[in-house]
Image (cartoon, coloured by chain):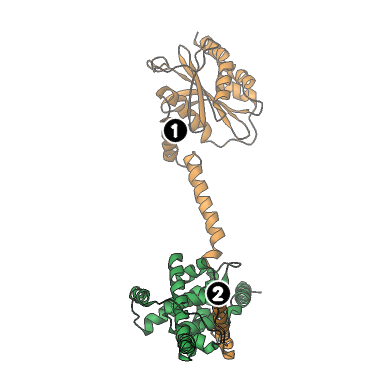
């Protein structure tokens, strides 16, 4: 009979002996069959909700998409919801900028456009002889993929607007002209112009996706509103401002 | 073919596939579960009931088991849950803290273990160890789980695993030394040799 001298080795031997002794325990032959029978009588629990996961994910995505679209002004089907959207967007810009932006959203954004653009001559005739020259000016300065879809006189919140609306692949643009009321002026609003290169101070503002570039004549406020980049919008307004100003002054005289 | 019959077929196919997975991943560990249950509760009949309970519970919650993870450790976790549940039903155990304090106070330096001991001697010594220590000896020394796995299975911190394991091993050696002495080996034989 030999005692193990090395404690480490002794420990290892003990563990091996223990392992062998415990593992020698025989599982009764019937136990496996008994367990199988018990299992067979018990259907596995089904994770019912897992089946609905794709549908739930799709629904959640839909809800989020609808929510986002609604916040961005889409799916506003009633006049009240459209007005609340216009108020929420225009509330973010200076008072004088709200005038043109409101009409753009009201008349251009919440509108179904025909598949094909109307004839330019038709649209120009809607503006009357004094303002029909605006059409070629606008067409000259906006990107080629924009088509003139509307040229008309419209009314919003008791004010009349000259409104030219253009539609690109996924962008909208409006040239909105309105007669000044009372003492409306960017100067009295103490706004600083963003550009003055053409001798005409151009003011800019932005709210959500809408970029506004604006200038004033003696009797009018002129807005170019689009969902293009702010700089691009500003440059277009800078380019067309002298010609537009000239037409408005001619029309006044 | 009516739609409900199609859906019935797909349900049956799904159940068959779950059954096949269970058969392949869980059933091979029956021996491990039974022998550990047997040593934990010290009674073969209870161990059979517990092993059955373990596999039944595993089957019922097999949808929660992630295929490819350690099914054996998962089954042992269920085993420990079942054993603890059964114990609470059968006995009122003294708090382990008291037991640990008692053992700390009474632990003596272990003797060298003679190598002639039988499996029965070793198992008898193992069975004399308090269950909390015995459980960890079974998990780590017999079933070869890592300390971390043993901690997860037993639901205790890893430090507690190590301290209980150390104490359990010392107790096992002590009990085995007592067995050896009862055979007239060890201290008794040393005395005899000295006389």
Circle nearer the N terminus (2, 1): 2
**Circle 2 crowding by C-alpha within 10 Å: few under 14, some 14–19, many from 20:** few
Of the pair A85 and B181, the residue shown nearer to us: B181
Contact between marks 2 and 1 (CB within 8 A): the answer is: no
User: Which label was assigned to residue A89?
Assistant: 1
Q: On the image, numbered disc 2 is attached to which residue?
A: A6
Image point (48%, 91%), residue name: B184
Label 1 secondary element: helix
Q: Colour of chain B?
A: green
Residue B87 x %, y %: 40, 81
Q: Is residue B19 above or below residue A184?
A: below
Label 2 – label 1 distance at C-alpha: 85 Å
Quadrant location of residue A24? bottom right
Question: Is residue B82 shown to the viewer in this render?
Answer: no
Quadrant location of residue A227? top right
Subunit of mark 1?
Answer: A
């Amino acid at each position: 009979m030999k005692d193990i001298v090395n404690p480490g080795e002794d420990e290892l031997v003990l563990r091996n002996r223990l392992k062998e002794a415990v593992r020698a325990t025989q599982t009764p032959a019937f136990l496996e069959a008994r367990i199988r029978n018990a299992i067979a009588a018990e259907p596995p629990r089904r994770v019912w909700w897992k089946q609905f996961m794709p549908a739930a994910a799709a629904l959640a995505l839909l809800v989020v998409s609808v929510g986002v679209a609604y916040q961005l002004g889409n799916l506003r089907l009633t006049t009240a919801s459209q007005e609340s959207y216009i108020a929420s967007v225009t509330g973010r810009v200076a008072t004088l900028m709200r005038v043109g932006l409101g009409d753009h959203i009201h008349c251009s954004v919440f509108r179904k456009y025909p598949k094909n653009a109307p004839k330019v001559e038709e649209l120009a005739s809607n503006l009357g002889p004094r303002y029909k020259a605006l059409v070629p000016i606008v067409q000259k300065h906006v990107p080629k993929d924009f088509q003139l879809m509307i040229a008309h006189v419209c009314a919003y919140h008791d004010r009349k607007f000259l409104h030219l609306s253009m539609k690109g692949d996924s962008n909208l643009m409006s040239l909105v002209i309105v007669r000044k009321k009372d003492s409306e002026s960017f100067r009295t609003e103490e706004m600083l112009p963003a550009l003055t290169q053409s001798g005409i101070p151009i003011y800019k503002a932005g709210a959500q996706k809408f970029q506004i570039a604006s200038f004033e004549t003696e009797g009018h406020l002129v807005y170019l509103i689009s969902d293009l980049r702010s700089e691009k919008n500003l440059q277009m307004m800078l380019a067309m401002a002298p010609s537009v100003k000239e037409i408005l002054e001619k029309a006044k005289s | 073919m009516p739609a409900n019959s199609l859906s019935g077929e797909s349900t049956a196919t799904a159940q068959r596939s779950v059954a096949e997975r269970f058969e392949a991943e869980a059933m091979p560990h029956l021996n491990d579960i039974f022998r550990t249950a047997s040593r934990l509760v010290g009674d073969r009949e209870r161990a059979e009931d517990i092993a059955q309970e373990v596999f039944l519970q595993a089957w019922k919650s097999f949808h929660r088991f992630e295929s490819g993870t350690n099914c054996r450790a998962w089954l042992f976790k269920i085993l420990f849950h079942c054993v603890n549940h059964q114990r609470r039903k059968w006995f009122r155990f003294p708090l382990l803290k008291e037991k640990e304090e008692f053992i700390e106070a009474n632990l003596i330096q272990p003797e060298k273990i003679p190598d002639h001991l039988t499996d029965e001697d070793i198992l008898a010594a193992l069975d004399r160890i308090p269950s909390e220590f015995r459980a960890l000896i079974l998990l780590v020394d017999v079933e070869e789980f890592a300390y971390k796995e043993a901690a997860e299975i037993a639901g205790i911190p890893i430090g507690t695993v190590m301290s209980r394991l150390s104490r359990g091993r010392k107790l096992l050696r002590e009990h085995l030394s007592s067995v050896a002495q009862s055979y007239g080996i060890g201290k008794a034989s040393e005395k005899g040799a000295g006389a």
